[in-house]
Image: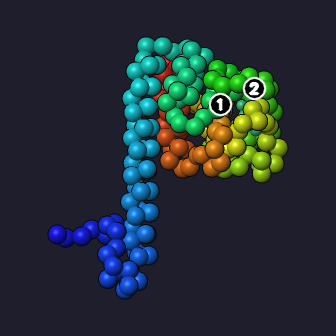
Amino acid sequence: MPRTEAQPPIDSERRAGKVEPYRTALRRSLKNRMSTSKAELYDQLATQLSGLLAGERDLVANAANFSSLIFHSLPDLNWAGFYFEKDGELVLGPFQGKPACVRIRVGQGVCGAGAAKCETVIVPNVHEFPGHIACDSASNSEIVVPLVKDARLIGVLDLDSPLPARFDHQDARGLENLVRILLSSVSS
Ligand code: SME
Protein backbone atom coordinates (compact mmCIF):
# COMPACT_ATOMS: atom_id res chain seq x y z
CA MET A 1 0.00 0.00 0.00
CA PRO A 2 1.46 3.44 -0.88
CA ARG A 3 2.52 5.38 2.24
CA THR A 4 1.89 9.09 2.69
CA GLU A 5 4.39 11.46 4.28
CA ALA A 6 2.48 11.76 7.57
CA GLN A 7 2.29 8.05 8.38
CA PRO A 8 4.39 6.77 11.30
CA PRO A 9 7.87 5.64 10.27
CA ILE A 10 8.49 1.92 10.08
CA ASP A 11 11.53 0.40 11.83
CA SER A 12 13.83 0.54 8.78
CA GLU A 13 12.99 4.24 8.38
CA ARG A 14 13.70 4.90 12.05
CA ARG A 15 17.10 3.31 11.58
CA ALA A 16 17.66 5.38 8.43
CA GLY A 17 16.94 8.61 10.37
CA LYS A 18 13.62 9.36 8.65
CA VAL A 19 11.76 10.17 11.88
CA GLU A 20 12.28 13.92 11.72
CA PRO A 21 10.64 14.37 8.28
CA TYR A 22 7.66 12.41 9.60
CA ARG A 23 7.42 14.69 12.65
CA THR A 24 7.61 17.75 10.42
CA ALA A 25 4.89 16.39 8.11
CA LEU A 26 2.68 15.53 11.08
CA ARG A 27 3.14 19.00 12.61
CA ARG A 28 2.30 20.57 9.23
CA SER A 29 -0.77 18.39 8.74
CA LEU A 30 -2.08 19.16 12.28
CA LYS A 31 -1.46 22.87 11.73
CA ASN A 32 -3.35 22.77 8.41
CA ARG A 33 -6.27 20.98 10.03
CA MET A 34 -6.44 23.56 12.86
CA SER A 35 -6.09 26.46 10.39
CA THR A 36 -8.88 25.10 8.22
CA SER A 37 -11.25 24.75 11.14
CA LYS A 38 -10.51 28.27 12.39
CA ALA A 39 -11.07 29.69 8.90
CA GLU A 40 -14.30 27.70 8.64
CA LEU A 41 -15.46 28.96 12.02
CA TYR A 42 -14.98 32.58 10.93
CA ASP A 43 -16.79 31.86 7.63
CA GLN A 44 -19.73 30.41 9.57
CA LEU A 45 -19.70 33.37 11.96
CA ALA A 46 -19.75 35.79 9.02
CA THR A 47 -22.89 34.08 7.65
CA GLN A 48 -24.56 34.00 11.08
CA LEU A 49 -23.69 37.63 11.80
CA SER A 50 -25.06 38.84 8.46
CA GLY A 51 -28.35 37.08 9.23
CA LEU A 52 -28.44 38.35 12.81
CA LEU A 53 -27.91 41.99 11.84
CA ALA A 54 -30.09 42.00 8.73
CA GLY A 55 -32.83 44.63 8.83
CA GLU A 56 -31.44 46.56 11.84
CA ARG A 57 -29.34 49.73 11.50
CA ASP A 58 -28.84 50.69 15.13
CA LEU A 59 -25.12 50.52 16.03
CA VAL A 60 -25.63 49.76 19.74
CA ALA A 61 -28.18 47.00 19.07
CA ASN A 62 -26.01 45.40 16.40
CA ALA A 63 -22.82 45.72 18.48
CA ALA A 64 -24.68 44.05 21.39
CA ASN A 65 -25.72 41.06 19.27
CA PHE A 66 -22.24 40.95 17.70
CA SER A 67 -20.53 40.66 21.09
CA SER A 68 -22.97 37.98 22.26
CA LEU A 69 -22.50 35.94 19.07
CA ILE A 70 -18.72 35.91 19.21
CA PHE A 71 -18.50 35.48 22.99
CA HIS A 72 -20.63 32.34 22.75
CA SER A 73 -19.07 31.01 19.52
CA LEU A 74 -15.33 31.60 19.76
CA PRO A 75 -13.53 29.32 22.21
CA ASP A 76 -11.48 30.51 25.18
CA LEU A 77 -12.73 34.08 25.60
CA ASN A 78 -13.39 35.77 28.93
CA TRP A 79 -14.40 39.17 27.50
CA ALA A 80 -15.70 40.39 24.12
CA GLY A 81 -17.08 43.82 23.40
CA PHE A 82 -16.79 47.35 22.17
CA TYR A 83 -15.50 50.77 23.13
CA PHE A 84 -16.78 53.76 21.15
CA GLU A 85 -14.74 56.90 20.54
CA LYS A 86 -16.09 60.09 22.17
CA ASP A 87 -14.01 63.29 22.43
CA GLY A 88 -10.63 61.52 22.40
CA GLU A 89 -11.71 58.79 24.80
CA LEU A 90 -12.93 55.25 24.30
CA VAL A 91 -16.18 54.75 26.19
CA LEU A 92 -17.46 51.29 27.11
CA GLY A 93 -20.12 49.91 24.75
CA PRO A 94 -21.98 46.60 24.52
CA PHE A 95 -19.99 43.61 25.78
CA GLN A 96 -20.08 40.13 27.29
CA GLY A 97 -17.92 39.25 30.27
CA LYS A 98 -17.14 40.79 33.64
CA PRO A 99 -17.72 44.52 34.27
CA ALA A 100 -14.95 46.57 32.63
CA CYS A 101 -13.31 49.98 32.90
CA VAL A 102 -15.58 52.60 31.37
CA ARG A 103 -13.22 55.17 29.82
CA ILE A 104 -9.83 54.64 28.14
CA ARG A 105 -7.80 57.47 26.61
CA VAL A 106 -6.85 56.98 22.94
CA GLY A 107 -3.21 55.84 23.13
CA GLN A 108 -3.66 54.18 26.53
CA GLY A 109 -3.63 50.40 27.03
CA VAL A 110 -4.20 47.86 24.26
CA CYS A 111 -7.53 49.39 23.19
CA GLY A 112 -6.01 52.86 23.07
CA ALA A 113 -3.04 51.57 21.06
CA GLY A 114 -5.35 49.97 18.46
CA ALA A 115 -7.38 53.18 18.30
CA ALA A 116 -4.33 55.46 17.99
CA LYS A 117 -2.76 53.35 15.22
CA CYS A 118 -6.08 52.47 13.58
CA GLU A 119 -4.63 48.98 13.27
CA THR A 120 -5.40 45.57 14.70
CA VAL A 121 -3.20 44.86 17.73
CA ILE A 122 -2.47 41.29 18.84
CA VAL A 123 -1.00 40.93 22.34
CA PRO A 124 0.19 37.37 23.13
CA ASN A 125 0.98 38.25 26.76
CA VAL A 126 -0.88 41.21 28.25
CA HIS A 127 1.45 41.24 31.26
CA GLU A 128 4.29 42.30 28.98
CA PHE A 129 2.32 45.06 27.24
CA PRO A 130 3.31 48.49 28.58
CA GLY A 131 0.24 50.27 29.95
CA HIS A 132 -2.10 47.28 29.66
CA ILE A 133 -5.31 47.96 31.58
CA ALA A 134 -6.32 44.87 33.55
CA CYS A 135 -10.13 44.78 33.74
CA ASP A 136 -10.29 41.04 34.43
CA SER A 137 -7.36 39.35 36.16
CA ALA A 138 -8.15 36.17 34.19
CA SER A 139 -7.00 37.78 30.92
CA ASN A 140 -3.64 36.69 29.53
CA SER A 141 -3.88 37.60 25.85
CA GLU A 142 -5.87 40.15 23.89
CA ILE A 143 -6.76 41.38 20.41
CA VAL A 144 -8.11 44.81 19.48
CA VAL A 145 -9.63 45.59 16.07
CA PRO A 146 -10.36 49.23 15.16
CA LEU A 147 -13.78 50.27 13.82
CA VAL A 148 -13.18 52.69 10.96
CA LYS A 149 -16.17 54.14 9.13
CA ASP A 150 -15.90 56.73 6.33
CA ALA A 151 -12.16 57.08 7.17
CA ARG A 152 -13.00 57.98 10.79
CA LEU A 153 -12.30 55.91 13.91
CA ILE A 154 -15.58 55.21 15.68
CA GLY A 155 -14.34 52.68 18.23
CA VAL A 156 -12.66 49.33 18.80
CA LEU A 157 -13.62 45.70 19.20
CA ASP A 158 -11.76 44.11 22.13
CA LEU A 159 -11.41 40.38 22.89
CA ASP A 160 -9.65 38.93 25.94
CA SER A 161 -8.61 35.35 26.61
CA PRO A 162 -7.34 33.48 29.67
CA LEU A 163 -5.03 31.52 27.31
CA PRO A 164 -1.62 32.96 26.49
CA ALA A 165 -1.18 33.73 22.77
CA ARG A 166 -4.84 32.87 22.03
CA PHE A 167 -5.06 35.18 18.99
CA ASP A 168 -3.19 34.98 15.69
CA HIS A 169 -3.38 36.51 12.25
CA GLN A 170 -6.29 34.27 11.26
CA ASP A 171 -8.27 35.72 14.16
CA ALA A 172 -7.24 39.21 13.05
CA ARG A 173 -8.45 38.66 9.46
CA GLY A 174 -11.62 36.85 10.64
CA LEU A 175 -12.54 39.55 13.15
CA GLU A 176 -11.75 42.37 10.72
CA ASN A 177 -14.21 40.75 8.31
CA LEU A 178 -16.87 40.52 11.04
CA VAL A 179 -16.29 44.19 11.90
CA ARG A 180 -16.81 45.07 8.19
CA ILE A 181 -20.17 43.26 8.33
CA LEU A 182 -21.13 45.21 11.47
CA LEU A 183 -20.16 48.56 9.94
CA SER A 184 -21.94 47.90 6.67
CA SER A 185 -25.09 46.88 8.60
CA VAL A 186 -25.35 50.38 10.08
CA SER A 187 -24.39 52.41 7.00
CA SER A 188 -27.24 54.25 5.28
N1 SME B 1 -7.24 45.43 28.50
C1 SME B 1 -7.78 46.58 27.82
C2 SME B 1 -8.84 47.25 28.64
C3 SME B 1 -10.20 46.80 28.32
S1 SME B 1 -10.58 45.32 28.98
O1 SME B 1 -9.65 44.30 28.61
C4 SME B 1 -12.12 44.90 28.73
C5 SME B 1 -6.67 47.55 27.50
O2 SME B 1 -5.53 47.39 27.94
O3 SME B 1 -6.94 48.51 26.78
Label 1: how many Cα within 10 Å (few below 14, some 14–19, many 20+): many
- Of 107 and 70, the residue lying toward us: 70
- Of 38 and 82, the residue lying toward us: 38
Q: What amino acid is found at the position of numbered circle 1 in the picture?
A: Trp
Which numbered disc covers residue 105?
none
Q: Is mark 2 within 8 Å of ligand 1?
A: yes
Is residue 107 in view? no
Residue at image point 32% right, 83% down: 12
Location of residue 29 in the rendering, given as x and y in whole percent from the top left corner: 38, 60
Q: What amino acid is found at the position of numbered circle 2 in the picture?
A: Ala
On screen, residue 174 above or below 149: below
- Of 144 and 23, the residue lying toward us: 23
Residue 104 sits in which quadrant?
Answer: top right
Which numbered disc covers residue 100?
2
Disc 2 secondary structure class: loop
Residue at image point 49% right, 40% down: 174
How many labels were placed on the picture?
A: 2
